[in-house]
Amino acid sequence: MAMRSPLINVMCKAADKAARGLRRDFGEVEQLQVSQKGPADFVSNADHKSERIIKEELKKARPNFGFLMEESGTEVGPDPDTRWIVDPLDGTTNFLHGIPHFCISIGLEVRGEITAAVIFDPIKDELFYAEKGAGAFLNDRRIRVSGRKNLHESVLATGIPFRGHGHIERFQKQMDKAMRETAGVRRFGAAALDLAYVACGRYEGFWEEFLSPWDIAAGILLVKEAGGYVSDLRGKPAILANGEILATNNTLHAPIQNLVGH
């Protein structure tokens, strides 16, 4: 069994405490679907509550660290070089529709580099975590990226433009190439979990554009520590601020980039 560092334990504790509320709230979504008001306000409250719990737990354990959070934005701490990057509910639309595929994502950024990561899927009870130089784990079992070497055997994941978000024409070209060359493309609606699935070998690759730092911060480290390769769609190092990502196993990075890159 893997030994978790004190830092990872702090992050796991925060994720677990917030997840208890998300599990309870998710159980209510099905009933709310049939109400006149609908579940949207309820889910927004669940999201904010999760963020509040995570922030309280992390601040209690590491009071000098700052925050970049989806709901409440940026808060600079006494240590300006270190901050938590948090998505309290990645996969909000899934949650809203009663689809059991969502997660909590927490990354620690130190001087511009992600050094620790936790992604927790509370419905499947899958806890992914990594620390720089220490490997990546799923429920305390060491994980590695897929060993597949051929595109025709590969399953990729992506996000799909919706309601005016994204570049539809470019995405259609990417999908056309990917569908012709791979074993399939999946769209599950939670970028953090897509990255975690690349890290544990369920997908050979994941690409998406127009993402926020909290969508990908933790997942980037997971993939790297699992032996994978992460870049932007041009093959340059992934930067949180530019919102695009390509994560793969090492062998297939160039072939997949040829399919979906700019």
Image (spheres, rainbow, N blue to C red):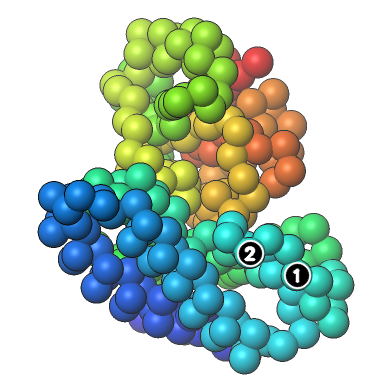
x, y percentage for residue 152?
33, 18
Residue at image x 65%, y 37%? 243
x, y percent for residue 235: 69, 28
- Judge by depth and name the residue closer to the eye, 150 or 109: 109
Left or right of 132? Residue 205 is: left
Label 2: how many residues lie within 10 Å, few (<14), some (14-19) or many (20+)?
few
Query: What amino acid type should be assigned to the residue bearing mark 1?
Result: Glu
Q: Is residue 101 left or right of residue 132?
A: left
The image quadrant where one finds the N terminus is bottom left
Q: What residue type is disc 2 on?
A: Ser
Residue at disc 2, secondary structure: loop
240 or 237, nearer to the observer: 240
Q: Position of residue 14 (x, y in %)?
A: 48, 80
Which residue is at the far front? 36
Q: Are marks 1 and 2 in contact (CB under 8 Å)?
A: yes
Name above or below for residue 42 compared with residue 95.
below
Q: Which mark is residue 72?
A: 2
- Residue 97 visible from this viewpoint: yes
For the point 64% across and 85% down, which residue is it?
Answer: 59
Query: Which of the 4 image quarters holds residue 26?
Result: bottom left
Name the residue that disc number 1 marks: 75
Q: Is residue 229 above or below residue 159?
A: below
Front residue of this view, candidates 160 and 259: 160
Quarter of the view holding residue 262: top right
Report whether residue 132 is seen. Answer: no
Identify the residue at image location x=80%, y=71%.
Answer: 76
In what element is the residue under mark 1? strand
Residue lying at the far bottom in this picture: please name it.
60
